């Protein structure tokens, strides 16, 4: 079903809205959550919480891109669960992926620096827009979807070594770009 029709179902408060959303994007949402949490039951719960969040937010909100909106909600809910689950223990898989970017993104993102965070976010999006499609795919899969290097290699038909090297080079270019923009 077309995304605009699913949004219409939400506006009509039809129970089919959630069913159609789940049918169309359920597997993707679950995969993103599992990549972060490494736990099926927690991930299923996060995806269901995301569906509830969309039910509560649409209307009044009208997402421009339903898939992106849903992924962002699933990812945020999964990250909250991840932080709650790992408050005591560290060095999990997702920490490893995030630590790769730690060297690049050293800015203190607190409420006082909200403007800086927004500017940083816009600059990263601009940077990503200038990458080749393949390098952008590697970057987004690794740092947004939380895919492992092996999973990215399998999805894209490349070797894990190539993916790893490209990600390292992209992080270096991002760091250089952010320095030139005087954001780090």
Image (cartoon, helix red, strand yellow):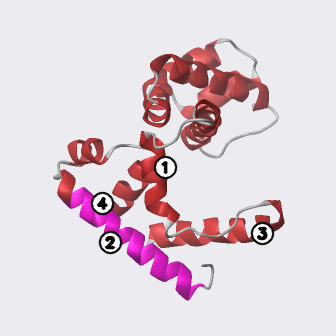
- Residue bounds of the magenta highlight: 162-181
Q: Which residue does the numbered mark 1 point to in the structure image?
A: 144
Q: Are marks 4 and 1 in contact (CB under 8 Å)?
A: no
Chain-order first, disc 2 or disc 3: 3
Residue identifier under label 3: 115
Q: Main secondary structure of the magenta part?
A: helix
Disc 4 secondary structure class? helix
Residue displayed at 36% across by 55% down: 137
Label 2 SS: helix
Task: Please tell me which residue lies in front, 22 or 117.
Answer: 117
Between label 2 and label 4, give the one nearer the viewer.
2
Q: Which residue is mark 2?
A: 169
**CB under 8 Å between discs 1 and 2:** no
- Distance of mark 4 from mark 1, alpha carbons? 15 Å
Which residue is most to the top? 15
Front tag of 1 and 2: 2
Give the camera-side residue of 163 and 72: 163
The answer to whether the residue labelled 4 contacts the one labelled 3, judged by CB atoms less than 8 Å apart, is: no
> Alpha carbon of mark 1 to alpha carbon of mark 3: how far?
21 Å
Near mark 3 (Cα within 10 A), the count class, few <14, some 14-19 or many ≥20, is few
Q: Is residue 62 left or right of residue 150?
A: right
Q: Nearer the viewer, mark 4 or mark 1?
A: 1
Residue 138 left/right relative to 62: left
């Amino acid at each position: 079903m077309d995304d605009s029709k699913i949004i219409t179902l939400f506006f009509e408060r039809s129970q089919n809205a959630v069913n159609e959303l789940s049918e169309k994007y359920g597997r993707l949402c679950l995969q993103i959550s599992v990549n972060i949490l490494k736990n099926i039951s927690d991930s299923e719960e996060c995806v269901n919480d995301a569906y509830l969040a969309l039910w509560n937010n649409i209307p009044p909100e009208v997402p421009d891109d339903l898939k992106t909106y849903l992924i962002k909600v699933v990812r945020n809910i999964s990250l909250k669960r991840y932080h709650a689950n790992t408050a005591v223990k560290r060095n999990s898989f997702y920490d490893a992926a995030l630590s790769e970017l730690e060297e690049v993104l050293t800015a203190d993102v607190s409420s006082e620096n909200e403007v800086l965070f927004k500017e940083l976010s816009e600059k990263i999006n601009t940077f990503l827009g200038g990458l080749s499609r393949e390098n952008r795919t590697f970057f987004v899969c690794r740092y947004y979807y939380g895919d492992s290097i092996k999973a990215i290699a399998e999805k894209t038909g490349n070797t894990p070594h190539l993916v790893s090297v490209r990600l390292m080079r992209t992080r270096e270019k991002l760091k250089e770009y952010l320095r030139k923009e005087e954001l780090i």
